[in-house]
Amino acid sequence: MILILVLSLTYLTYLGGLGELPPNDVRLIAKNYLNLTYNPYVKSLWASSPEAVTAIVWDYRGLDTLFETVVFYGAVLAAITLFRKVAKEKDMLQSKGMSVVVKRATAIVTVAMLTVAFSTALHGHLTPGGGFQAGAIGAVAPLVMIVVFGKRYLEDRGLSYGRLLSLRNLALTGIGVTSIALFTYALIQGGFSFIFQNQGKSLSPYSFPSYTLDVPSGGILLFFNVFEFLAVLAGFTLVFLILLGSDELLSKEFEGGENGY
Amino acid sequence: MRKLFKVLILSLGVFTVYIIYTGSVKLYDIATGVIVSLIVSYLTANIVIEDWRKALDLRRVATFIKFAFRYLLIDEVKAHALVIRLGLSPRLSLKPAIVKIPINSRSDYAVTMTSLAITNTPGTVVVDLTEDNSVLYVHWIYATKIEPQEAYKEVCEVFDSYARKVFD
């Protein structure tokens, strides 16, 4: 019975029951993308990145990704605005956290998580991964730490609202500066270059460095990945820090009775 | 000054993790690895490292490696064999009990190592430990001994003595 169902569905799909099938020469598109991302022979076309996805996300449609980052930034900003009364305060609950076994094991794992996150960010233009993924990996570390060690423990050791917000703003500024760095440089040199330009084009010879040490750098991609990593890491951590506050702290926010502003 | 040593010791470990995860040893990986390991260990050194001198004691490291082999090759196999025998026997002859086991490990990492070693062998699970980390409550699927000292000898004497040599 199941076999008949599967076979009939397969047949229907094959006949085009789900709409037009992709053409047989679909590999041409892949070939095109590869030619335009990592093609050392035609340097006016390449993005100097063996990772086609990152090249497309931050080079081809960099502006789109910039706005995605801004949307995320805005979402975190909205969360902070909602919790503005409690966001800056240290938690009054002196939580002892979990048992010593969990704490020690978590301490070691946290180090590994942060390391993996950094590696993912720094190799975003070489292997799958990139800024956002690295930020999401890295943000697990503070999340687990807050639960296991208690929020106050981390706050007493310098994880604060102000610092995270500064890191986030710094990273976002970094993305902005990177996107117009080459443009400014070209302007000073008396030439011209596009905003978000990565490697030299036929119209404009200015280019970010194609290699860092001995690997292709993806030029602008490396900077974008690192800044995006820091922005996402700080953003997520900020939200976790606020949402995982103790009941007493958060209830201040829910009491209401606030008039005006 | 103390923090500096902590950071340097930890950064060795971080650098190893970084290179293993990255899976390549080009110049770029080594350069970024050095920077990242310094940053990460600066951020986490105070939380992770209790006493940096112990990490430099080669005798402790050697004991730890010896324990790793012994644990995986002997203790794990013995525990698995017991649980497999219990699982396959037609009469489900279990003697489950939660036993109280005093341990001699004192430092945080030694207690952690002991109790994780117990938990990771099938058949025994650490349920809880007292506030001063001196007594473990262990759920044991086939409790042959109930008295604390006897149970200590059966379940965790090996782990405990190794943990003391490595971390205490």
Image (spheres, rainbow, N blue to C red):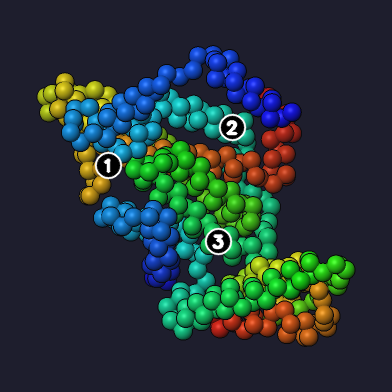
**Chain of the residue where label 3 is placed in the rendered structure:** A
Mark closer to the observer (2, 1): 1
Disc 2 versus disc 3: nearer the observer: 3
Few, some or many residues within 10 Å of mark 2 (<14, 14–19, 20+): some
Residue at mark 2: A79
**Could you tell me residue A143's position as x and y percent?**
58, 48
**Residue A107 has which mark?**
3
Among the two numbered marks 1 and 3 on one chain, the one whose residue lies closer to the N terminus: 3
Q: On what subunit does the disc labeled 1 rest?
A: A
Please identify the quarter of the rendering in which residue B16 is found: bottom left
Q: Give percent across and percent down for residue B73.
A: 58, 75
Q: Is residue A80 above or below residue B113?
A: above
- The tag on residue A217 is 1
Quadrant containing the C terminus of chain A is top right
Task: Specify the amino acid type for callout 1.
Answer: Ser
- Say which residue appears at 49% left-offset and 58% top-offset: A111
Q: CA distance from mark 2 to mark 3?
A: 28 Å
Residue at mark 2: chain: A
Q: Are marks 2 and 3 on the same chain?
A: yes
| Front residue of B83 and A244 | B83
Q: Report the Cα–Cα distance between label 1 and label 3.
A: 33 Å
- Picture quadrant of residue B150: bottom right
Quick check: can you spot residue A219? yes
Q: Secondary structure at mark 1?
A: loop
Tag 2: amino acid? Ala
CA–CA distance between discs 2 and 1?
35 Å
Q: Earlier in the sequence, mark 2 or mark 3?
A: 2
Q: Residues within 10 Å of mark 3 (few under 14, many from 20)?
A: many
Query: What residue lies at 45% left-to-right and 57% top-to-bottom?
Result: B43
Give the position of the N terminus of chain A as an image quadrant: top right
Instruction: Tell me which numbered mark, 2 or 1, is placed earlier along the sequence.
Output: 2
User: Is there one chain holding both mark 1 and mark 3?
Assistant: yes
